[in-house]
Amino acid sequence: MGIRTVAVFSEADRTSHHVMYADEAYLIGPAIARESYLNIEKVIETAKRCK
């Protein structure tokens, strides 16, 4: 299909399957969810870099 995948991950999820199988993967913060996955500004900033 030619669709590339991008994953974001916290330090705790560094070796998760979604990170290993993605074409690109970006660390967005520490294991604490509010400092990584729930940090919407960081997630959006990362998405913009992947255009």
Image (cartoon, grey):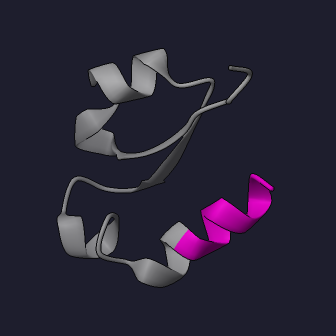
Say if 6 sits above or below 32 in the image: above
Point out residue 11 in the picture as x, y percentages from the top left corner.
Answer: 32, 42
Q: Does the magenta stretch include residue 50?
A: yes
Identify which residue, 10 or 40, lies in the foreground.
40
State which quarter of the image contains the C terminus: bottom right
Looking at the rendering, the stretch of residues picked out in magenta corresponds to: 44-51
> Looking at the image, can residue 15 be seen?
no
The residue under the point 64% across, 62% down is 47
Residue 35 horizontal side relative to residue 46, left or right: left
Q: Which residue lies furthest to the bottom in this view?
A: 41
Q: Does the magenta stretch include residue 19?
A: no
The residue under the point 68% across, 29% down is 3
Total numbered circles: 0
Residue 48 horizontal side relative to residue 30, left or right: right
Point out residue 34 in the picture as x, y percentages from the top left corner.
Answer: 23, 75
Identify which residue, 50 or 2, lies in the foreground.
2
Residue 3 horizontal side relative to residue 37, left or right: right
Point out residue 9 in the picture as x, y percentages from the top left corner.
Answer: 38, 45
Q: Is the magenta stretch mostly helix, strand or loop?
A: helix
The residue under the point 31% across, 56% down is 30
Say if 41 sits above or below 8 in the image: below
Among the 4 quarters of the image, the one containing residue 45: bottom right
State which quarter of the image contains the N terminus: top right
